[in-house]
Amino acid sequence: MEKATGRGPINTIVVSDKIFGKLPDGSAFDIDIEIGAPYLFGPDEWVCPLHAPALKYSNKLIHAGSALQAMCLAIASVRMSLAYFREDGGKLSFEADGDDDFDIKATFGLSDLF
């Protein structure tokens, strides 16, 4: 595989989605999530690009020992950030004016391990 070039570190977007967040004070905002295809970064190192500015991941490279591990860690990073946001009183929804209906467990297929 070749190193990614182009817009930030993401060359090929594998996942692109939008959900909506609402802070405890009622302020609403978009949560845009993009995860790129993992690529070889060094002799024994892979990275998976992650771009989700609302979650504090702006053109972030998630480093790992394999492509699968890098992708899994990127996805887990998004899941953890969304879970922490909700724990802090935030609400997540599929629609801009929706209720707190975004099911983290159903979306990520993970139990509450963290």
Image (tube, grey):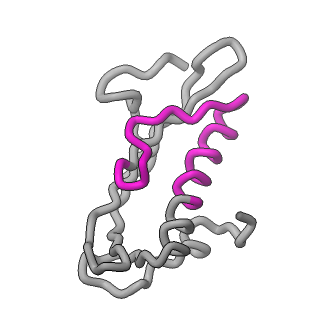
User: What stretch of residues is rendered in magenta?
Assistant: 53-80
Residue 40 drawn at (x, y percent): 59, 21
Quarter occupied by residue 9? top left
Q: Residue at x 40, y 34 (%)?
A: 12
Which residue is the extreme one toward the front?
A: 25
Assess whether residue 113 is covered by the magenta stretch: no
Left or right of residue 10, residue 72 in this image: right
Image coordinates for residue 97, horizontal then vertical, percent: 24, 82
Give left or right: position of 64 versus 38. right
Location of residue 9 with respect to 26 vertically, above or below: above
Secondary structure mainly formed by the magenta segment: helix
Q: Quadrant of the N terminus?
A: top right
**Residue 26 location, quadrant:** bottom left
What residue do we see at 67% from left, 39% from top? 68
The image shows residue 22 at horizontal and vertical percentages of 33, 75
**Residue occupying the far bottom of the picture:** 99
Q: Nearer the viewer, residue 86 or 19?
A: 86
Nearest to the observer: residue 10 or residue 92? 92
